[in-house]
Image (cartoon, rainbow, N blue to C red):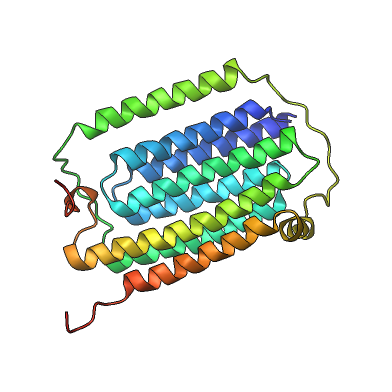
Amino acid sequence: MTADLILFFGLAAVAIGAALGMLLSKNAVYSALFLILNFATVAVFFLLLGAPFIAMAQVAVYAGAIMVLFLFVIMLLGAEQLLTSHKSGWQRPIAILLTLVLLVESIYLIFGRGRLLSQVAPVASDYASPEAIGELLFSRYLLPFEVTSILLLVAMVGVIVLIKKPKANN
Amino acid sequence: MIPLSWYLILAAGLFCIGFYGVLARRNAIAILMSIELMLNAVNINLVAFWRFLAPESISGQAFAVIVFAVAAAEVAVGLALVISIYRSRKTVIAEEINLMKW
């Protein structure tokens, strides 16, 4: 129990700290690296919740593929230095205000409405294996799965069209 | 076992940090990164609700897998847009992309 608590609070501190570091660092490359740290800690949260497949997919897809894409584009465009001079300063106070309202509201709802649910049914160690998730995706959730594949195909075609250089004659 | 509320609070905190990033950052790539953070917070909620409220079916994890795929597609399209805009306007600052501004 105490080991769980220490693990949870340590990981939560690392996750929130990494997210704040992502937000506050001036260099976009450092932002991306902080975000990778955040994704890795969230993967450990998935392991704590008993979802090993999701944790591995988180590391492979988010911390691997997506962040490599981000770093590649940041270095390609040379966009790592952010401008610190802020011309329209009215955005930042409004953003802080709206964020605080959202945070207080969600904490109020979670603690005000929800009962403090701390008992969970124990599950077998091989429960929710990649095999079981695959079976579920290909039987009960076949249609959303196929729609997702079409979405990925459309995104791929769209990216190729967007990136293609314009023709020389126009 | 950690109560469900704590996971929800953590996810709400991460979501709010991402929300602030979307509203206040000026670099378009940083805005996309903040959107990734928000999607990730949603995934924590999905898996936590699955574990605490409906552990007998694995549906929550199937939803999380689909969110991964949507996030990957969204990042690819968003970064392609950023590169395309950078080619024509030579900037990634969101305020300077005002071609359609009235």
Q: Count the marks: how many? A: 0
**Can you say whether B17 is above or below A118 in the image?**
below
Q: Horizontally, is A8 left or right of B12 in the view?
A: right
Q: Which residue of the protein is positioned furthest toward the top in this rendering?
A: A112
Q: Residue at x 24, y 77 (%)?
A: A166
Quarter of the image with the N terminus of chain B is top right
Above or below B5: residue B87 = below
Q: For the point 43% across and 64% down, which residue is it?
A: A69
- Left or right, A40 with reference to A28: right
The residue depicted at 25 percent of the width and 33 percent of the height is A92
Extreme residue in the front direction? A143
Residue A132 lies, in percent from the top left, at 79, 56
Looking at the image, residue A67 sits to the left or right of residue B26; the answer is right
Specify the farthest residue to the bottom. Answer: A169
Residue situated in front as seen by the camera: A87 or B74: B74
Where residue B22 appears, as percent x and y from the top left, is: 35, 42
Instruction: Please give the name of the residue rendered at 28% of the width and 48% of the height, measured from the top-left corner.
Output: A26
Asked which quadrant contains residue A130, the reply is bottom right
Q: Quadrant of residue A80?
A: bottom left
Residue A169 point in image, percent of width and height: 17, 84
Along the line of sight, which residue is nearer the eye, A60 or B36? Answer: B36
Residue B83 % position (x, y): 29, 65
Question: As rendered, which of A159 and A15 lies closer to the eye?
Answer: A159
